[in-house]
Image: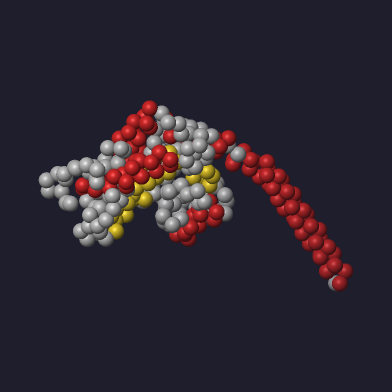
Amino acid sequence: MARMKFLCDAERCIECNGCVTACKQEHEVPWGVNRRRVVTINDGVIGAEKSISVACMHCSDAPCMAVCPVDCFYRTDDGVVLHDKDLCIGCGYCFYACPFGAPQFPQAGAFGLRGKMDKCTFCAGGPEADKSEAEFKKYGRNRLAEGKLPACAEMCSTKALLGGDGDVIADIYRERVTRRGKGSEVWGWGTAYGQGKGGSAPAPAGAKS
Amino acid sequence: MAQTKITRLNRRNFLLAVGAGGAATVAAIAAKTASQAQPAATGTGKRSTRGYSASEHINNYYRTTKV
């Protein structure tokens, strides 16, 4: 049985935020809510700067699911963690529990008013009927039902963000890592796109490494 | 005077009893309605369905990631 997973290849991510834009555009996500964002560490440090694209990781043992007082979360057979906005009371427990900061809230009013929680759905919609108007309004487009994968992963220009069947994704990443080799020279353009130890792939003029 | 006081208290108790009984009836009806409505709200069959299938579009995406 396929289990849906995201994996971000930090060697390839160029912090273009294309995934963030693709997500917002695809689901018409409102202002103030970012289902996906790019996090950069060691910004500006040559050789040490890394970026990764982060959203809901659809955990196998999801802490949001464990703490929700109204039990609005559920996991599909594909391993996608979804929630029911009709049941959500906007308490924010899931936000405190999530190590990735995935749950987002559309409002910030008086008395802790937050509104219904919103998060990445792996482009799998919600509990409403597939591809229905109600589903789109609450959760965004259901690309999985259309035979497609999440827009962020498909739109990624460098294919740093991988999404899909966990087994296939793991094989793709393993192949990349094996090709790259190891050691201090493992960084930069040649590492991300070159043929690695076995072949030669000169970096384009002006590129680092 | 004492007789009048007792009469008033009795009447108050009667009204209190009627009020409490009415509230209990309303609560019982609400609880019954909620317990009936809950399965309809949460028990949508879609929760257990599968959305993923390796379509041509998806296989094409996997191919592009190997570049």
The image quadrant that residue A120 belongs to is: top left
Tell me if residue A138 can be seen: no
Identity of the residue drawn at 57% across and 54% down: A69
Residue A7 at x, y percent in the picture: 37, 46
Identity of the residue drawn at 49% across and 42% down: A79
The image quadrant that residue A184 belongs to is: bottom left
Q: Is B60 drawn above or below residue A4 in the view shown?
A: above
Identity of the residue drawn at 22% across and 60% down: A45
In the displayed structure image, the side of residue A185 where residue A76 appears, left or right:
right
Q: Nearer the viewer, residue B13 or A176?
A: A176
Q: Nearer the viewer, residue B52 or A146?
A: B52
Residue A104 at x, y percent in the picture: 42, 51
> In the image as oriented, which residue stretches furthest toward the bottom?
B2
In the displayed structure image, the side of residue B18 where residue A140 appears, left or right:
left
In the displayed structure image, the side of residue A188 where residue A125 appears, left or right:
right
> In the image as oriented, which residue stretches furthest toward the right?
B3
Q: Is A186 drawn above or below residue B64 in the view shown?
A: below
Q: Is A9 drawn above or below residue A134 in the view shown?
A: below
Residue B50 at x, y percent in the picture: 51, 34
In the displayed structure image, the side of residue A191 where residue A144 appears, left or right:
right
Q: Nearer the viewer, residue A169 or A26?
A: A169
> In the image as oriented, which residue stretches furthest toward the top?
B56
Residue B56 at x, y percent in the picture: 38, 27
Identity of the residue drawn at 30% across and 51% down: A10
Tell me if residue A167 can be seen: yes
